[in-house]
Image (cartoon, helix red, strand yellow):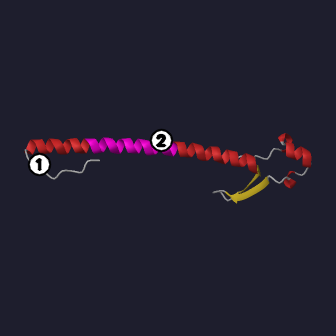
Amino acid sequence: MQNTCIPESCKLYSLLGPPAEQCPNYVETSWRNDKGEILTLKDCSPRRIIVMLQTLSNNSVGLQKSIEESRDESSMVNKLFTTVLKRIERKNGSKSEQLPER
């Protein structure tokens, strides 16, 4: 992740002046990564929200695609299973219990 607070290109910063920390949109986030290093992000809230929304949107599109593929595969398996059962019934010449139609 990169910092989204860029004072040089911010109109609010040019109005308020330095330091960037006095901006009402300024947010600083710190955490430790897997290696134990402390990482700090300096963010402009509106920019970070847009970045996060885009990430969430992309994730939901990918999830929707995956769900649709799973649905299609399960439908194909269901049709194949039904076909196999019908062939077994024809071969045996007997009617077993009817499966409920979907």
**Amino acid of disc 1:** Lys
Pointer 2: residues within 10 angstroms few (<14), some, or many (20+)?
few
Q: Position of residue 67 (x, y in %)?
A: 44, 45
Q: Decide if residue 58 is on the left or right side of residue 19.
A: left
Q: Position of residue 76 (x, y in %)?
A: 31, 41
Q: Decide if residue 73 is on the left or right side of residue 8.
A: left
Quadrant housing residue 38: bottom right
Q: Decide if residue 20 is on the left or right side of residue 100.
A: right
Placement of 60 over or under 30, stated as above or below: above
Q: Position of residue 83 (x, y in %)?
A: 21, 41
Residue 34 marker: none
Q: CA distance from mark 2 to mark 1?
A: 39 Å
Magenta-colored stretch includes residue 63? yes
Residue under numbered circle 1: 95
SS at badge 2: helix
Residue under numbered circle 2: 65
Residue shown at 18%/45% (left/top)? 85
